[in-house]
Image (cartoon, grey):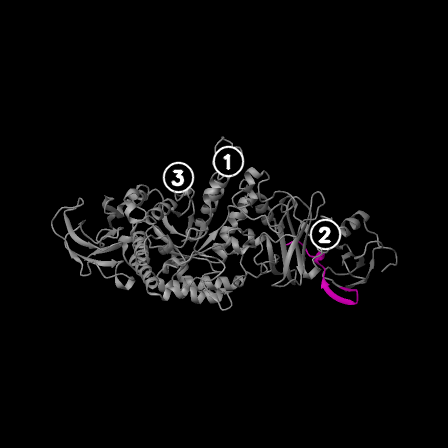
Amino acid sequence: MSNEIPVIDVNDAIALCEGRHGNPFAFLGPHGGRVTVWQPGAERVWLEPGTEARPVEGFPGLFVGESPVRDYRIRAQGFGSEWVQDDPYRFGPVLGEIDEYLLGEGTHRKLWDALGAHLMVHEGVAGTHFAVWAPNAQRVSVVGDFNHWDGRCHPMRLRGATGVWEIFLPGVTEGTSYKYEIRTGWGHVQTQKADPVGFGAEHPPRTASVVRDLSRSNWTDDTWMTTRYQAQNVDAPISVYEVHLGSWRRAPGNRMLSYAELAEQLIDYVEWMGFTHIELMPVSEYPFDGSWGYQPVGLFAPTIRHGTPDEFRAMIDAAHRRGIGVLLDWVPGHFPSDPHGLGQFDGTPLYEHGDPREGFHHDWNTLIYNYGRREVMNYLTANALYWLEEYHLDGLRVDAVASMLYRDYSRPAGEWVPNHLGGRENFEAIAMLRDMNSAAYGANPGIMTVAEESTSYPGVSRPVDHGGLGFGFKWNMGWMNDTLSYIQKDPIFRKYDHHKMTFGLHYAWSENFILPISHDEVVHGKGSMIEKMPGDGDQKFANLRAYYAFMWAHPGKKLLFMGCEFAQGREWTHEQSLDWHQADLPPHRGVQLLVRDLNALYRGTPALHRNDTRPDGFRWLEANDPDASVFAWTRLGAPGEPMMVFVVNFTPVDRDYRVGFPAAGRWEEVLNTDSSAYGGQDRGNFGGITTEPEAWHGQGQSARLRLAPLTAVMFRQA
């Protein structure tokens, strides 16, 4: 090699050393026979095969040499150490023209295949490909232990107008922690950012992303995946157990259970209880335990609190082998403003709205996605598809939909921006939800999506091509609020709120409803379900048993939060296990066994689930007896299937009560919440009843029943 001082553009050298060069591949790496090497911290550099590279005077870490091949390696010495590596700047791009086109168009449905950190063999060398969207950045670098978190070391390649930066780093392996260092368009170096499409994360409070290999899969759930549509449609029995993985049960020392432990203990319990589905509160990585996962930063990373992505997959697989579906709480409504997160990602409001009247949630101190930006819409839709496809999840329950639908949600006058028609509807968020639902149902047969939506917005569970939002189901928040308000009252005053228990039937068929008793009803001073009940100890349990029977007999799918099934005494906290010892106490055990039997009856009786979403399956028998606080109805399945009659007495009065029956003959009492098995006193009609030809409640047949205090009974046509 010549002894002449290497010739290099001074402006390039200055920009590189100052960490502001946005196009390093233009001069680093091989160009002709000449190789420019960037090795901060190196004192001497050799190219193998090739020459010893000469340092560029005045620019430490910059060397120029020659090599006869493109697949040379670098050997370097510095500060008493020596290392050998492949030069990242000798590799060509990984993303192809189709990726560029779809990324630029905002229609890359498998965004996670293009962005994020991917282990691969590229041009014959093993390493990791990194790609991130930051269109307004001057320079983006990958940082980690492999370069001492120095943003000058590995600036990335910008892929044209897409705004995506990429680089292949040889030798970076699975488990490596990394972030992106972003220099804004005006020269400010941001707090290092976690990967918006990172597949793993460090244990909080650490905030880096972690390289994870998604290519391994050992699914054994083919039978479930090909038949799950039978368990997830409007005619199927759907009874959901809502779970916070961190506090369902704890190991000794208050340690959270691993995914592997949950795959055994949780799945065993759910199967024993007879629930058809588990709904997981958010598992997308989140920094703050107290958010319960509803303020996620790593939207593509299952939380490391319980294990790795592979272990999370194994837990889902275990549920499927038992015939149990798994739904995931998904949070596209907002994200936290943690400095390592999405906020001001490239120095501009990239994922969020710039105007706080559109981009900031006062209730939660969080940022709101800019749904009108095509790349952001695609990011969210692709994330939904990612969980369904990569983790075989059976559906998504979408959090806080009401906050997305309305621009004035929880905002005083003057602090929100109307839509282009002057109204309050958020047309961009509506378009995103429709896009997500259309894509999810189109790409993943048999899945279900559920909206937590608390307003009367029409058509939430109507298909998109029929003008709806496209969800499969909607939480019935009105039913929940009305019925809880009623059941918490002293029975002597319930007659004044009798309509609260019947009002839900006025709109029960307007959506495909799920009746939810969720975590939100047993936190923040609201008390546990058993604490809500009036009366002394025995009356509290009797009230709760009757309420649960009312819920399971009522049209609509079911959802119950963990701990409510055994009437936990205190309200829920995320910081400790449920009080499982209470499930061994007779009154609590009785409620648990009741819920188990309700699930079995619901699953095994078509009349209780086949027409949950249609008026064909319901007929009132008695809706207008507020003085007695008695309600009675018939549930019907398909023609020829046994009918069911449900009656409940919500007063502490033992009643001899005549009820009309829709058919003559023998009716078996298949459930009585006053059974001693549930903690009651065995007052009822345990031999069943035979109707009499006495017209009552609009029916030609009737029978006198014993309705024990605060008791529900259910009869099946014999």
Mark toward the viewer: 3 or 2: 3
> At which x and y percent is residue 389?
48, 55
Residue projecting furthest to the left: 693
The residue indicated by pointer 2 is 25
Residues at marks 3 and 2, CA–CA distance in whole angstroms: 53 Å
Whether residue 175 is situated above or below residue 559 in the rendered picture: below
Please, which residue is most extreme toward the top here? 422
Task: Please tell me which residue lies in front, 512 or 583.
Answer: 583
Magenta-drawn stretch contains 83: yes
Query: What amino acid is labelled 3 in the image?
Result: Pro
User: Which residue is nearer to you in this view: 682 or 415?
Assistant: 682
The reply to whether callout 2 and callout 1 are in contact (CB within 8 Å) is no
Quarter of the image for the N terminus: give it: bottom right
The amino acid type found where label 1 is placed reads: Pro
Residue found at the very far bottom of the displayed protein: 252
Q: Which mark is residue 174?
A: none
The boundaries of the magenta stretch are 75-94
**At x 64% / y 58%, what residue is drawn?**
178
Instruction: Name the residue that disc number 3 marks.
Output: 458
Relative to 440, is 248 above or below?
below
Circle 3 sits in a helix, a strand or a loop, which is it?
Answer: loop
> Does label 2 or label 1 sit earlier along the sequence?
2
Q: Quadrant of residue 129?
A: bottom right
Residue 96 in sight:
yes
Q: According to the image, label 1 marks what residue?
A: 412
Inspect this view and state whether residue 322 appears.
Answer: no
The spot of residue 587 in percent (x, y) is 33, 62
For marks 3 and 2, the one nearer the N-term is: 2
Q: Look at label 2 and name its amino acid.
A: Phe
